[in-house]
Image (tube, rainbow, N blue to C red):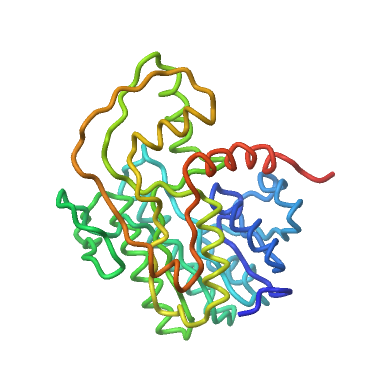
Amino acid sequence: MELRNRTIAVTGASGMLGAYICRALFEAGARVRGVVRNPQKAAFLAQYGVELAEATLENRGALSTAFRGCDAVVSNAALYNITDVRWAANYRANKEGTENVYEAIGDAGVRRAVHISTFGVYRWSPKPDVIREDSPVIDGERREGGAYRATKQLSEALAFAISDKRGISTTALRPAGIYGARDKNLSPWLTRLMRLPLAPAPRLHFPFVYAGDVAQAIVGTLRNDATSGKAYLVAGRDGTVEEFFRAWKAVTGARTSFFSVPFGRGLRVDTSAAQRDIGFENVPYELGIQKMLEDERSFSQTLS
C-alpha cells in the first residue's frame, strides 16, 4: 500500500507506542486518525496532523464509526502494566477489546490491519535457543505465561480468526521490551534504579527495542501487502540487560555504580524476517535512549 494520502486509524494513539506510530505514519505521508479514550489527553498529537476520534475498546459501535473511511487500522491499544496481573482486567482489554476492534474493522469495511502483539506469546525456555517466528507459543486458554502474555496470545489468535472471517488482511508484529518517551512501565523503574549508589546489572540477554523502530516497522508492514497473514518478530537487539543499563547511565548521566550479576542465558531473538520483509532496523542502545530523551520534549509540545 502506498501510504501517501491514505487514512490510517491507530487505536491507543496517545499511549507510549501509539504516539510513535502516529508520528511515523505522518512522516510517511499518511493521514492519521487517532482513536483514543480521552481526546483531551491526546492534544499533543495535533503537531502531527492527527485527527482524533473518541472510542473505547468496549464500544464496538464507536470503534466502527472511528474506522469508517480508513484504508487501514493499526490495532495497538491494549492493557500493559507490569504491576497489573489481574486476569479479568487483561482479558477485558486485550482479548475482548481486540474482538471489538476487529469486528468494528469489518463493520467499517476496512480491509487492511496491523495487530500489535508481543514476543511474550512464545514459550520462554532456559535453553539457549533463539526465538524465531515459528517457535512454540503459549496456550492462552490455559492462562500460560500469566495474565498479560496469555491474553495477548488469545488476542493475536482472535485477530487472525476474525480477519479470516471478515476478509481483513492482517499482519501481526511481536515486539519486546519497548522503551521510549511517555513510558509508564520500564522508564520509571529504571529512573529509580539509577538513583541508587550501587545497583545490580544482570548479565543475561533480553531484547530491548526502541519504540521508534517498532513504529517504522509498522510503516514497512503497511507498505508490503505480501506480509498479510504473517507474524513478525520486531523484538529488539541481541544485547544483555547489563549493556542496556550501562547505556542508560551513559546517556542520562546517572551516577549509580553497577556490579555484574550472572543470571542465566536469557532470551535471544531472530529478527531477520522483519529486516528482510518490512525494513526493520534496531538502533544501538545509546542512540535509542538519546532519541527517547529528545522524544520526551517533542511529544510534550502542543499546537495552540
Residue at horizontal 40%, vertical 83%?
A: 164
Residue at horizontal 41%, vertical 84%?
A: 165
Q: Is residue 259 above or below residue 3?
A: above
Percent of width and height locating residue 274: 43, 67
Q: Is residue 301 above or below residue 154?
A: above
Spot the residue most to the left: 127
Residue at horizontal 57%, vertical 70%?
A: 73
Percent of width and height locating residue 245: 40, 32
Judging depth in this view, the residue of 188 and 56 nearest the camera is 188
Q: Is residue 195 above or below residue 160?
A: above
Percent of width and height locating residue 282: 47, 54
**Horizontal relation, residue 119 to residue 163: left or right:** left
- Tell me the quadrant of the picture where the N terminus can be found: bottom right
Spot the residue most to the top: 197
Judging depth in this view, the residue of 246 and 228 nearest the camera is 246
The mark total stands at 0
- Tell me the quadrant of the picture where the C terminus can be found: top right
Q: Is residue 97 above or below residue 3?
A: above
Residue at horizontal 71%, vertical 74%?
A: 4
Q: Quadrant of residue 74?
A: bottom right
**Horizontal relation, residue 163 to residue 68: left or right:** left
**Horizontal relation, residue 255 to residue 144: left or right:** right
Percent of width and height locating residue 196: 40, 16
**Horizontal relation, residue 302 to residue 149: left or right:** right
Judging depth in this view, the residue of 212 and 303 nearest the camera is 212
